[in-house]
Amino acid sequence: MLETLSLMAHGFVNALYPVNILAMIAGVTIGIVIGCLPGLSAAMGVALLLPMTFSMDASTGMIMLGAIYCGAIFGGSISAILIHTPGTPASAATAIEGYQMTLKGQAGKALGIACVASFFGGLLSCISLYFFAPLLGQLAMKFGSPEYFWLSIFGLTIIAGVSSKSMVKGLMSGALGLLLSTIGMDPMQGVKRFMFGQSSLYEGINVTCALIGLFSMSQALILAEAKIKARARATQFKDRMLPTKEEMKTIAPTIGRSWIIGNLVGILPGAGASIACFMGYNTARQFSKHKELFGHGSYEGVAGSEAANNAVTGGSLIPMLTLGIPGESVTAVLMGGLIIQGLTPGPNLFVGETAKMTYTFFAGFVLIQFFMLGIGLIGCRGFANIARLSDAILIPAVTILCVVGSFAIHQNFVDVVIMLIFGVIGWLARKFGLNNAAIVLALILGPIGEKGLRRSLLLSNGDPRILFSTPICWVLVVMCVIGILSPILMDRMTKKAENAD
Amino acid sequence: MKKTDIGVCLVMYAVCALFLYMTLQLKKAAQIYPLCIIALLAGLTTLHVINMVVAAKREGVTSGLEDFKDFLPGQFFTLLAMIVIYIAVMPYVGFYIASILFMTASLLFLRVKIWQIVLSEIAIFALVYCAFTLFLEVKLPAGSLLG
């Protein structure tokens, strides 16, 4: 206990270093800009800027990526409120009430409430991050090869959850990712597999290149395929942004409920901020004393949606940091950031010197929320104008950043070509209903599962009963079953929430 | 059922066939795991084919091209060709020259105003120079033709 408190204090001291503060300011600002640009997602932004964290200290790099993540989730609300176009899917529910408030001349108030609700949602989610992450980390210390095999299988069941339309197509995407993860040296036999004569594929496909290609390059191609349209001019506003005491009293219970919803959704594999915002919005309406205001510009509607989507951020980090299981696309990209720094996501992040890095990141995540509040409130007017930036400029700009980012990893062209190939795969996957997040999850989890399985079988001389030899194995088997069934449940809950709107 | 899904299934079977061929070239002990994954992908694709047949009988067949209703082939393939050429010529002319040519050509093609082209190029190259050359100390390709 004392050791944990000491690590927490140490984390805050480290997080307050000027370099980390700079990383927070830069990350939140970049994140908000990316978030408020319709067409660019949080995952895309984090993937695009991943290479910039290479030379940074691990904790600083993770703080910057975390800041981009939080900033992008909040940034989506700016264009949702001002031009009725959610910058990210996580702000889809915010657009309903936020734009109605804009039409009533309360754009400033809507943005202020979104900012304050996002702040509290994000800040409260840090509590669960501090509380649950070390507990799960301690449990994961008991894992051996059979448990790691089941853990990766559990992670792969998430694929079913991230599959947007067809579960079978999602699973096909995952299997394709697993197949691509076999490229490179066989971990047990030392045999070269499917390397196409490229020695740079010895260690397998570089996950960062694949991430940049699948999330960022494919997005540039998506923008390139449609007619370039001029975006609506953002509404100018002069009204007071900060909510009054009375308004704060009204939205406080809504924020509390949305925090719990967002956190649970974040921890659950396969769910994400886009689901949480609708659930938060719907719950706000159910409990509201002024239901008649919903659909006509309700403060509580904006607060419910924004607190829930930002509460997802802390929750979604828990399974990624403790078990090495990314629950959705942004955490998969963040996991790539950890791997680049030479760190293995999982229980080892909570022991020895690495624990200091982890707690510095946690403390940074708390401070990020304060910067998000400040930068959000001060910069809203400026960010609103950025939301008008044309897709015509974004296409070559994103392409150049993808190229330079993938080149910077090992300073060779093979990585750039791999990035482009994955960009085209990502574009095709999106056009034909396959799932990029599933491909990435499988690409990351495939090698963990393969090593776990083959090491287990080696230890047991080929006896598969070793895979069911401990109670933890059985718990993980049950979780796999839940992992497959939970998307069906989530799908029903989302449809129910959307239909209610 | 969408007709385009037939293409998706054919591509998946082709990927399975390619990896199966390459797997059979490996030594026996290294074949097992990839074979399991190939079987998994082929099995899921077959399951999707069955779903498609059931859906075709129940709901009929659509072209699947409705997902491409806003697709501008001329614009898309021209930009894709520009990206491929940009990456192909970069080792010869260097990062900055290739990028300036690519960005100018693509922005002119997309009918962006000249002052916006100049402004966006200054912004993006300042960002790349500061972040990658100064901060990360990445040696961006200078180009073999330019020494």
Image (cartoon, grey):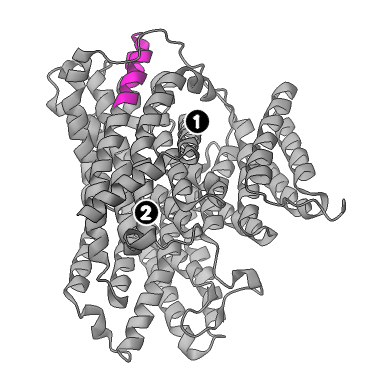
Nearer the observer, disc 1 or disc 2? 2
The answer to whether one can see residue A227 in this image is yes
The amino acid on which the numbered mark 2 sits, given as a three-letter code, is Lys
> What's the residue at 52%, 38% (across, down)?
B69
Q: Is residue A44 above or below residue A154?
A: above
For label 1, the crowd category at 10 Å Cα-Cα, with few meaning under 14, some 14 to 19 and many 20 or more, is many
Judge the density around disc 2: few (<14), some (14-19), many (≥20) Cα neighbours within 10 Å. many
Task: For mark 2, give the secondary structure.
Answer: helix
Image quadrant in which you'd find residue A253: top left
Locate residue A409, reporting x and y percent: 60, 56
Q: Main secondary structure of the magenta part?
A: helix
Residue positioned 42% across, 74% down in the render: B37
Q: CA distance from mark 1 to mark 2?
A: 31 Å
Q: Is residue A425 above or below residue A274?
A: below
Asked whether residue A272 appears in the rendered view, the answer is: no
Highlighted range, magenta: A98-116
Residue under label 2 = A356
Q: Chain of mark 1?
A: A
Image quadrant in which you'd find residue A67: top left
Q: Are marks 1 and 2 on the same chain?
A: yes
